[in-house]
Image (spheres, coloured by chain):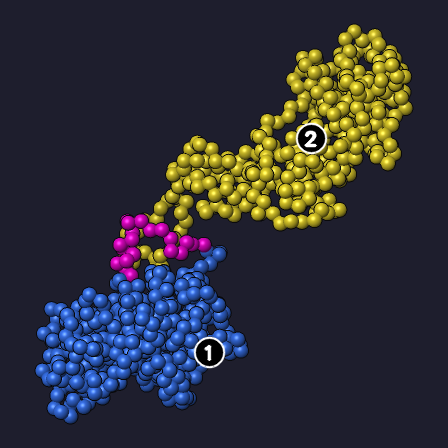
Chain colours: A yellow, B blue
């Protein structure tokens, strides 16, 4: 809108007040520093062996949408229901909420998200025409197969035993019930469009472009290891997933990460682009990045949505809109469709109040016009 | 209805009859009774208004500024030190063109500490842009409150109703209290063209650059100068309905007066008696109660004293380094307009009684009689140590 022209004293308002709006005044030209939303790496996420987007997942739970939280997890982790039960949760050790009262029950929330009904519709790349066999169905093998499936390959997991899951089938029943493992296996194969053959016999590798072998958790001379390796016999150059000393049940996330990395190696061997990349995030958020005064103490809750609402979302914008509330010029606006905060740079003067006020240190002032 | 009532009680009752919607006030002697009475009226549900308790007079006026900006009829009351503390907000109220009405009980400013009548408190707020009206008696307190709201809401400027501390605040008189219906007929509800409205947002007291600032001030001055006429009309309409007039300039035996005693506030009564006494001595005396000091009623005043040769001006105040403030104002008004000689007397500061005899003696001195006080600069100080 253009500035209103006033030609006589009697056109002035009696009261000294603004007449019409002030958008004609492009105060953005005064700006020296510019607010930029720059999420830092939440310490929980930094500690996760899989680098899962923990604050974002918890935000979805707090919003009452566990299915959306599950979809976020499954872009990183094919078996959140397993890690949500077995993992040694290094995330929780790093939770900054402990500076205020008690840390967030992150593992319980991960499990809670995994209980969402149905399978998330993750993006699966176009068919590559490549056929891949994964011998052995431990978490590493399943993760490799899962990501190779998402990459558009035709993937078959060959398991010599009766049940898919590798060493997970030997987990204590109190930790991981067989039904849960079955459900998780079913869901990951559905999401990635892969096939799992149990009681597979050697000699099924006809026409495969690449063979992967997962015998990681078993002793090399054990019967299980020998059975898996027997499946791969006949392939000239199988890609073997190995880990020194194998995995304990609590280290399942490391096994999954090994498989995810093997998927990228397999893609390279097939002459295809990597299927998984950890996003580049800023430095790890510290308690100094938070303004703890914004947060009221609240007891740990058994109820997932309530517990999720306790998350401080360290270094990670969760659309709390404190910036919008603080901006003297109404320049921080929520874009509901995009789920982002948009800054009106035509009018932002660069005062920095939004950055100062951000309770989680996700807005920085950059030395740029 | 006739009632025996004190000045401070009258101010509260007048605010009730004016149906004020927001009261934010801090008690201070000699205004306290007004605040107590208003909180009682609101507490008992006899006045449908919001009473905002505040920690200071600055906040009281700030609350009234906010209330008035939302379109409410706001009222407050203060005195002396409290008025001085409000100073910043007084500019805000007038500059914001907010029709707040305030009672000020005139009292001396410390130090030294003194609770009694003195006009320095309100007169040193002359330049804040408020309309200033000085009451001469208790009936004037009641009536001028209604006129004040009527004028304020028409011209969009705040009004300060001044009561001489103790002489008026704590004096009971028989007055006529109009019925609510009568007051409603004279004073319609406040319905401003602009008010703070979330559905129609606007910045009040916004920034204004040099391009428009002087034009805004020019317009405010134009509309402030027109208040003399607006108040006269509102007073005439009040007189038509209630039979009592409260004009900016109130004269007594001025028609052929060669010497005029000019006072503000309650001294007007003694001035009338003094003029009457002087008439008996053959002096063509009259008296003039200058009820409105801001805006200065130039037209009415010049006309009222057009035949006078001497003006005896009482100041219950002093502008240090100059002279009495009222005398200064009158000299400024008459400069180049009149040959009358202005005799400035400073008396009654800090609560000294102004009697008929004192005013008559001052007039005799002005006409060449016995000296009553000590000449200092352009003023004669009465009853000071030699």
Q: Secondary structure at mark 2?
A: loop
Q: Residues within 10 Å of mark 2 (few under 14, many from 20)?
A: many
Figure disc tally: 2
The one of A163 and B109 positioned closer to us in this rendering: B109
Query: Is B230 drawn above or below residue A218 in the view shown?
Result: below
The verdict on residue B215 being magenta is: yes
At x 41%, y 88%, the residue is: B3
Label 1 – label 2 distance at C-alpha? 69 Å
At x 67%, y 21%, the residue is: A275
Relative side of A292 to A149, left or right: left
The chain under label 2 reads A
Q: Secondary structure at mark 1?
A: helix
Q: Position of residue A369 (x, y in %)?
A: 42, 33
Quadrant housing residue A267: top right
Span colored in magenta: B201-220
Q: Badge 2 is on which residue?
A: A48
Q: Position of residue A264 (x, y in %)?
A: 69, 18
Quadrant housing residue B269: bottom left
The chain under label 1 reads B
């Amino acid at each position: 809108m253009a500035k209103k022209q006033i030609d006589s004293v009697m056109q002035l308002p009696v009261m000294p007040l603004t007449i019409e709006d002030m958008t004609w005044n492009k105060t953005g030209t005064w700006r020296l520093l510019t607010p930029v939303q720059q999420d830092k790496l939440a310490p929980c996420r930094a500690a996760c062996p899989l680098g899962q987007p923990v604050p974002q997942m918890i935000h979805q739970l707090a919003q009452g949408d566990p299915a959306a939280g599950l979809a976020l997890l499954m872009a990183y982790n094919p078996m959140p229901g397993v890690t949500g039960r077995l993992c040694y949760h290094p995330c929780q050790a790093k939770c900054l909420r402990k500076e205020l009262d008690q840390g967030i029950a992150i593992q319980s929330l991960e499990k809670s998200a995994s209980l969402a009904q149905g399978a998330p519709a993750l993006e699966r790349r176009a068919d590559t025409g490549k056929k891949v066999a994964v011998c052995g169905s431990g978490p590493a093998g399943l993760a490799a197969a899962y990501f190779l499936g998402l990459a558009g390959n035709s993937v078959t997991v060959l398991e010599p035993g009766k049940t898919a899951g590798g060493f997970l089938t030997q987990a204590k029943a109190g930790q991981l019930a067989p039904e849960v493992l079955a459900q998780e296996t079913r869901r990951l194969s559905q999401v990635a469009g892969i096939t799992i053959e149990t009681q597979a016999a050697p000699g099924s590798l006809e026409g495969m472009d690449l063979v992967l072998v997962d015998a990681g958790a078993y002793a090399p001379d054990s019967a299980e290891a020998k059975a898996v390796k027997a499946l791969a016999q006949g392939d000239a150059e199988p890609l073997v997933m190995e880990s020194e000393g194998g995995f304990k049940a609590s280290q399942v996330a490391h096994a999954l990460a090994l498989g995810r990395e093997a998927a990228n190696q397999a893609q390279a061997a097939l002459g295809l682009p990597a299927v998984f990349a950890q996003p580049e995030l800023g430095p790890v958020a510290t308690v100094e990045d938070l303004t703890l005064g914004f947060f009221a103490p609240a007891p740990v809750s058994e109820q997932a949505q309530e517990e999720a609402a306790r998350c401080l979302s360290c270094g990670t914008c969760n659309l709390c809109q404190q910036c919008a509330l603080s901006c003297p010029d109404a320049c921080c606006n929520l874009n509901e469709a995009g789920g982002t905060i948009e800054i009106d740079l035509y009018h932002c003067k660069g005062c920095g109040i939004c950055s100062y006020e951000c309770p989680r240190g996700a807005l920085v002032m950059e030395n740029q016009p | 209805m006739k009632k025996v009532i004190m000045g401070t009680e009258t101010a509260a009752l007048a605010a009730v009859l004016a149906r004020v919607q927001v009261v934010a006030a801090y008690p201070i002697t000699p205004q306290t009774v007004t605040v107590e009475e208003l909180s009682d009226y609101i507490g008992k549900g006899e006045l449908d208004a919001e009473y905002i308790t505040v920690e200071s007079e600055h906040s009281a006026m700030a609350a009234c500024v906010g209330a008035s900006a939302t379109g409410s009829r706001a009222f407050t009351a203060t005195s002396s030190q409290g008025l001085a503390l409000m100073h910043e907000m007084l500019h805000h109220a007038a500059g914001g063109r907010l029709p707040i009405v305030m009672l000020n009980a005139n009292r001396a400013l410390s130090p030294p500490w003194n609770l009694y009548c003195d006009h320095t408190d309100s007169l040193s707020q002359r330049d804040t842009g408020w309309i200033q009206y000085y009451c001469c008696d208790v009936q004037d307190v009641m009536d001028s409150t209604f006129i004040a709201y009527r004028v304020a809401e028409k011209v969009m400027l705040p009004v300060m109703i001044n009561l001489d501390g103790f002489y008026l605040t704590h004096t009971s008189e028989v007055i006529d209290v109009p019925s609510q219906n009568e007051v409603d007929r004279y004073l319609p509800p406040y319905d401003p063209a602009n008010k703070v409205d979330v559905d129609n947002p606007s910045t009040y007291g916004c920034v204004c650059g040099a391009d428009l600032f002087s034009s805004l001030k020019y317009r405010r001055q134009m509309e402030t100068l027109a208040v003399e006429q607006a108040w006269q009309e509102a007073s005439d309409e009040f007189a038509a309905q209630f039979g009592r007039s409260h004009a900016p300039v109130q004269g007594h035996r001025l028609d052929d007066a060669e010497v005029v005693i000019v006072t503000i506030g309650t001294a007007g009564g003694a001035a009338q008696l003094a003029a009457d006494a002087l008439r008996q001595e053959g002096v063509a005396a009259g008296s003039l109660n200058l009820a409105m000091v801001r805006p200065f009623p130039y037209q009415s005043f010049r006309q009222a004293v057009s035949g006078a040769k001497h003006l005896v001006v009482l100041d219950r105040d002093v502008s240090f380094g100059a002279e009495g403030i009222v005398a200064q104002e009158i000299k400024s008004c008459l400069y180049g307009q009149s040959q009358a000689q202005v005799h400035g007397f400073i008396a009654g500061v800090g609560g000294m009684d102004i009697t008929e005899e004192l005013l008559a003696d001052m007039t005799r001195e002005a006409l060449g009689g016995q000296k009553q006080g000590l000449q200092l600069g352009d003023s004669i100080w009465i009853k000071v140590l030699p």
